[in-house]
Image (cartoon, rainbow, N blue to C red):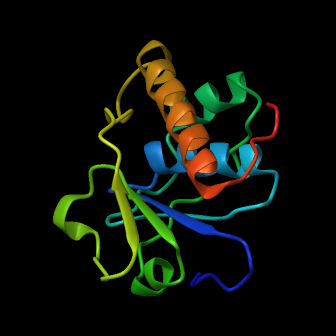
Amino acid sequence: MTSTTDKPSVLFVCVHNAGRSQMAAGFLTALSGGAVEVRSAGSAPADRVNPVAVEAMAEVGVDITAEQPKVLTTEAVQASDVVVTMGCGDACPFFPGKRYEDWVLEDPAGQGIDAVRPIRDEIRTRVLGLLDELGVPAAAL
C-alpha cells in the first residue's frame, strides 16, 4: 500500500469536485467507519460543493456540508491505493502500478434533486462494491 497509514486509501476524482466525487467520498467515509483513508479532488475544482448533492446526501444521513472542492495533485494520486475517476478524461494523471477505476455516472451539475437521487444511489452501490473488494465491512447507514 502507498497510503501514509495502514488503511487502504481511495481518491475520487471528477472535473469540479463538487458533485459525484464529493458524494462518493462522503459515502466511503461513512460506510467504512474510518477504515479507509478517503480523498477527493477535481481537475478544475468549483468554488463550492453542489448544494443539490449536499441535499441528496443529507436525505440518506451523510453530511458533506463542510467539504470544499480541492485541486487534483500528483501527490494525492501517488498517496492513494485506488483512484476512481468520474468523467475527468485526460485531465487525470496516470501512474503505473496504481489501481484505477472509471465510474461512468451522469453529472449532477445543474440538475434538480429528482435527477440527483438516482446518481447518489448508484454511487452508494458502487462504494459498497468497492468496500467489498477492499475487504472492509460496510457500516450501517
Q: Is residue 21 above or below residue 35?
A: above
Question: Which quadrant of the structure image shows residue 77?
Answer: bottom left
Q: Nearer the viewer, residue 122 or 91?
A: 122
Q: Is residue 80 left or right of residue 3?
A: left
Q: Is residue 71 left or right of residue 92?
A: right
Q: Look at the image and tell me in which quarter the C terminus lies.
A: top right
Extreme-left residue of the structure: 90
Residue in view at x 51 percent, y 52 percent: 48
Question: Which quadrant of the structure image shows residue 4?
Answer: bottom right
Q: Is residue 7 left or right of residue 82?
A: right
Q: Look at the image and tell me in which quarter the N terminus lies.
A: bottom right
Residue in view at x 56 percent, y 51 percent: 133
Q: Could you tell me residue 121's position as x and y percent?
A: 53, 25
Q: Could you tell me residue 68's position as x and y percent?
A: 58, 59
Q: Could you tell me residue 119's position as x and y percent?
A: 44, 27
Q: Is residue 104 left or right of residue 39?
A: left
Residue in view at x 35 percent, y 45 percent: 103
Q: Nearer the viewer, residue 41 or 101?
A: 101
